[in-house]
Amino acid sequence: MAEKIVGADLFPATGVTIIDDLPLLASFDGLTMMEDLVFEHKLWNEKLVAQIEGVGIEPDYYWQLEQQLLVSGAERVLLVCSDGTSAKLRYVYYESHDHRREALTAGWKQFQEDLQNFEPETPVQALEGEVIQDTTALVVQLDGSVIDSNLHLLEEQIFKRIDSVKSALVTDQDFADAESAVKFFKKTETKLKDGKETALAQVPDIARLFTRIDHLTETMATKRKSLDKQVKHQKQHIKDSIVLKAVTTLDKERQVINTELTPGWIAAVVTPADFQEVIKGKKNVSSMQSAVNDRLAQARIEQKQQAQNIKNNLAMYRKMAVDKDYLFPDLDVLLHKEQTDLMAIIELRLNQEAKQKVADKEPDPATEPEKGEDQPDLLYTNGKVTEEILTDDIHAMEKWLGKGSLDCYRFDRHGNEYRIELIIRRAALITPAQQLSLQTEKEIA
């Protein structure tokens, strides 16, 4: 069925290649003889079908497709989801995305580096709490009975009073009634306590028994609360230690990169809160450490990609603007721009300098001979310039300028964030009537 879709024979294969000193491998459910198309089949499942039919392929699948395209050199992948019948068969063609391919290669490079530097740790045996033999059940036998009691009457009075209390206090009368009820409950609580002590005084053995039970309960509760607090504190300390180690490691690597990049620099790519987020819900130390390690590896990749972009920009700058550093006092910020944008800025400033040099050599306009009639009219005035602050909303500016470009101005080389205002300055246009008036004035002069 797949061969009918693509109109060519398909052959299962395994491919290997070397890219940037990385030995990579991929297996293919099918590959054309020309190796220009890959076939990948997944068993029928509604989630993938929804992605194929419009939601979009998710990372769980597209990283495999990117790997297949990278290894094979093919132009696209035919991704099919079916149960082997034409009735339940959906497919889509997938082509590589440059940023995903770059991220995939960067990920493999980081994995290779981690693998070379990996030092296996001695497996830690899973610990279980000390097995504490359970206590025997409390057994109490009492020989006796209550001869007389008016507890049932007291119960009726108390519950009647409880039911009569309003849950919402609005008027002054409501507050007055509530205060009376508080006094009633406090007085009645004292009566119950005194009545209990009086009853127990009539049976000293039972009174002593209850006192000992209460003492044991209170002693264990005090120890339990203290121990529970200590356990929670220590677990939080371990979490904080894991996060701090990751943050410190990453920041040290960033400092080394920034030293090598001077005058370029890279900002921090993650915060402690990002690491705290990935360990949320983890129950043991090993799972927390694993989650932090994964995020740390991802952050290292992001730092290196950012550093490589800066290096590329710096190399291009040094090629285009030799001995022109005085024109670029903001170079540390400009290096964060897209390379095409940076090239445009460099060319603009170089051209401005060249024009200024030419203008400095030209004679004073007052001594120049009168220009011919073919001189074009000005398109805008040199007079009053109006200023309008459009916005200081970061989200709005991100849409207009792009997050990458905006961040170059929001952060300095140390990662400090600044408030940004976007300002437009406009000079008034000359209308056709004004142009005619200017031309008449020239003729009269």
Image: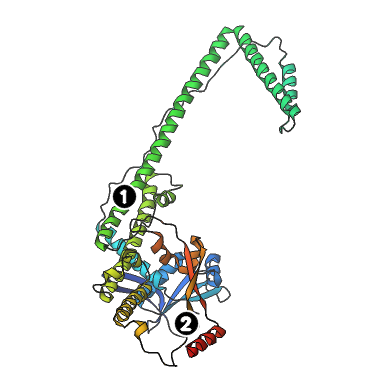
Judged by depth in the image, the label closer to the viewer, 2 or 1, is: 1
What type is the residue that disc 2 sits on? Answer: Glu
- Residue 378 spot, x, y in % from top left: 47, 83
Q: Is residue 348 toward the left or the right of residue 429 in the image?
A: left
Q: Distance between the residues labelled 2 and 1?
A: 54 Å
Residue drawn at (43%, 47%), measured in percent from left and top? 282
Residue drawn at (53%, 20%), measured in percent from left and top? 138
- Can residue 295 be seen in the rendering of this structure? yes
- Residue 358 spot, x, y in % from top left: 30, 81
In the picture shown, does residue 148 fall above or below 426?
A: above
Label 1: few (<14), some (14–19) or many (≥20) C-alpha neighbours in 10 Å: few
Q: Is mark 1 on a helix, strand or loop?
A: helix
Residue drawn at (26%, 55%), measured in percent from left and top? 118
Residue drawn at (31%, 68%), measured in percent from left and top? 328
Q: Is mark 2 on a helix, strand or loop?
A: helix
- Mark number for residue 404? none
Figure quadrant of residue 265: bottom left
- Residue 18 spot, x, y in % from top left: 28, 73
Q: Is residue 224 toward the left or the right of residue 19 in the image?
A: right
* Residue nearest the viewer, comparing 353 with 333: 353
Cβ atoms under marks 2 and 1 closer than 8 Å: no
Figure quadrant of residue 172: top right
Provide the residue designation for mark 2.
3
- Residue 415 spot, x, y in % from top left: 36, 56
* Residue nearest the viewer, comparing 399 with 433: 433
Q: Is residue 238 toward the left or the right of residue 196 in the image?
A: left
Provide the residue designation for mark 1.
248
